[in-house]
Amino acid sequence: MMITTTMQRVFSSVFLLALSWSVQAAITLSDPVPVGPQVKIGKLANGLTYYIQKNTKPEQRVELRLVVKAGSILEDDDQQGLAHFTEHMAFNGSRHFKKHELISYLQSIGVKFGADLNAYTGFDETVYILPIPTDKKDNLETGFLVLEDWAQGVSMNDADIDKERDIILEEARLGKGATDRMNKLILPEVFNGSKYAERLPIGKEDIIKNFKYEAIRRFYADWYRPDLMAVVVIGDVDPVQAEKMIVAHFSGLQNPAKERVRDYARIPDRPESKSLVVTDKEATNNVVLIRYPVRTSAQEKTMADYRQNMIKRLVANMMAQRLQELTLQATPPFLGASNSLGMIVRGYESYSSYAVLGRGGVEPAIRAVVQENEKARQYGFSTEELERAKKMQLRNVESAYNERDKTNSVTYASEYIRHFLMQETIPGIVNEFAYFNELLPGINLAEMNDYVRRSIPVATQKLVVYMGSDKTEVPAPTESTLLQLVNAAEKMPVVMNEQKKVAASLMERPVKPGSIVSEKINKELDLLELELSNGVKVILKTTDFKNDQVLISATRFGGQSLYGDKDNYNARYANAVVWNMGLKTFSPTDVPKVLAGKSANLQTSSGFYTESFSGNAGTADVEALFQLLYLRMTSPRKDEELFKAFVSKSQDATKNTMANPESIFNDALISTLFNDHPRLVRTAKPEDFSKIDLDRSMAIFNERFSSAKGLTFIIVGSFDTDKMKPLITSYLANLPTPELAIKYKDLGLHAVSGVIKKEVRVGSEQKSRVSITFNGDARYSKEENLRFHAMIEVMNLRITDILREKMALIYGGSMSGGLSRTPTQTYRIGVMLPCGPDNVDKVIAAMFAEIEKMKIEGPLPSDLNKVKQNWLKERQTQMRTNGYWLGNLQDSVLYGTDMAEMLSYEKRLDDVTVYDVKEAAKLYFNTNNYVQLVMYPEK
């Protein structure tokens, strides 16, 4: 009944929209793009802008944002890094909240620091993010008070500033490495010597260490002013009430008596072509970038601009498709590439070509991307390419339209932030759906190709950058050679691409359907359970959580454990090998062409002990999803050339992975933890892919995925059961079910026992990582699982509060873990704490001190309550998502547990006590059984 109502609402909306098109005047291209009726935009007398929209996804939650048009580009020379520092100080005490009070209060109402409560600083903006539960009236009032304090009430106490210096320096330390070192050389050229290259948000360490208090207070006073601010309020709130609260909290903000001019930095023209070669011993990829002239970007104001942007997106889609097809060669010219016109910073854009290099090095990559530009510029695209791109674009907009009342408030908030910062148009999805239906069909091939000729640069100045490893089989080019290669590629003759005809559909519906042999209704969970004539089972859960989403999943025991060590790599990569060759008669790039205009995706996966099918589709595209599933099981495709392409790309992509210090450390950790077991999944290396045999890998895939025996397909989403049943009988009931071993073998991947401590010296930066891993036997139950994770989450609160905020030893660190049921019942807890080498001993001591405190005293009741409140808020949202239901039902089917247990979560959570967490800490934090690894820089 629920879904029938949903479908009626969707069809009714489409009918009304169609009716509105028939009576409205045709779109006039000279008209401005309107602001949609879904949002109210206002401005206070002091210049502050506000956006308000009622949206009930999720329910009882409001997304608040404070957006400031002030970022690192506005810093004076003595303030480099202080825009970002100011953002940090907003969480360190304000007019109405003492230090630590704000975060503690928000955690108490279920808002998690980092995951929910957050902020970011860019070149031109700072954005504060605050989701507020609205189940209690006072929460929203307090949320607005927080935003008001962030706007002009941050305390900026001397002692708090000094404490935060170390935390920000630790944040800067996290970003150090090959990319950071190379960017410092490249960005001045990428930004054509503009101020942007001198104002990276993280700033300069010497300034962060030594700036005078007055410098940060000056930045805050100069730039945190209402005429540069916006407040965004999206969610389950009365718009009239929200507007009153905005007026009450922000009308009193004042602009400075002497306002500094808010200018935007200019990116100058590049006078001549230039090339740059930058290498680093820790670089993991070799890439080439061709940046054509930077130009000012025109704002989208009129319907003509809106239509032009549609053309731009069509071109980007078609160009991406052509470049992807080049990667299917046995020796592809690159691992991945793009040719596109994109924004650099606010107000500036550039056409650029980018490629990740393969074994052939820079020359074939440059030749390929440049020639694809030239082919498009000289010959344009084909009618078939354009029609496919139109179908894809219209389907994307249609999906957004269908979900207009089920779209998360976060999505709308981001859209209005872009409107405030960059004047992105916001006509609303109802209008946009109408625009696309009216404008898209009228875009013809001639004007499309004319746009391509005008937008792709030719014979002009450019910046060519090579960035990569200094130890590669193909030596890095010289700077003069790099530019010569581009110039030569531009002069090469090109021929028009031949377009391969593709089928109109993947397959015909099977002539003889199977049947449903039994049906059972689960009233408690509102499920329909089916058994099919081939023995396959199906569980149907219709929902109204989304209007255009259907999810499917089936998991059973089996997996890689059924194959011996000699088949390790054949089994591990069987899925990847098969998927990279396509299905039936279709190559991997043929499939999306056939499905153009449809939304359907399928994946298969194989772990050590399980194997799975999973997929998603739009409500109208379920048959396409079932066809993908049917063909994947019945019609694998063997292609020697595509297999060679897969091996070649994989080897090239992993050639330099072990140059990354973190990869070396992670491999050392897992090797130590599992005593160098031969079945460990370490960082992939080129030689791994030489061990794959095509025939054997396909045979393994077919053994496990050509039979549906023992599978229960769980289907959750927006669908009509009566329409779903014929598809189920045609496809799922027709799946082959030959005999298959539905079991797994214990591979002996068991963690070591005792206390093991090691040091790993790697990397040139002054960076360390402390890893502490506890493991052992466990007894799984849903109750014990909650106690276990409550213990971990309370410990994460302590890590943030003690190691970061009070001791300033780290910027970010965390504890994670889980209880495993397969192949045996065990637990593992991992602690990862990045820090400075000089602080390693302090970090370890502090971490173990908190662990011991938890074992002796247990958690603070307030901390446990914070965890519970956050979980309850998450649960409230999750229960209205298809993915959450699918995951819980799948878990119950796999392990044979009562599916209705998911309904008693709140009771189990309420039963978790301080005593339970303390006892869990005693049990799981066994200080006689852990592995401790510390990464230090090379000596």
Image (tube, grey):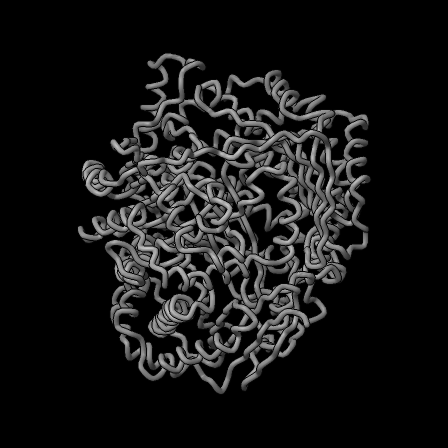
Residue pictured at 81% horizontal, 39% vertical: 480
Between residue 799 and residue 728, name the one nearer to us.
799
Position of residue 124 relative to residue 934, above or below, is above
Residue pictured at 61% horizontal, 49% vertical: 634
Position of residue 178 relative to residue 595, above or below, is below
Between residue 834 and residue 631, name the one nearer to us.
834
Residue pictured at 52% horizontal, 29% vertical: 391
Instruction: Where is residue 395? Give x, y as percent.
Output: 48, 32
Between residue 41 and residue 765, name the one nearer to us.
765
Q: Considering the image in quadrants, where does the C terminus appear?
A: bottom right
Please tell me how many numbered marks the rendered image carries: 0
**Is 713 on the left or on the right of 836, as rendered?**
left
**Is 408 on the left or on the right of 825, as rendered?**
left
Instruction: Where is residue 545? Give x, y as percent.
Output: 34, 45
Which corner quadrant of the image does residue 109 belong to? bottom left
**Is 171 on the left or on the right of 27, as rendered?**
right
Q: Considering the image in quadrants, where does the N terminus appear?
A: top left
Instruction: Where is residue 229? Give x, y as percent.
Output: 34, 38
Residue pictured at 48% horizontal, 25% vertical: 299
Residue 41, can we see it? yes
Which corner quadrant of the image does residue 34 belong to? top left
Position of residue 679 relative to residue 140, above or below, is below
Residue 719, can we see it? no
Instruction: Where is residue 128? Give x, y as percent.
Output: 37, 48
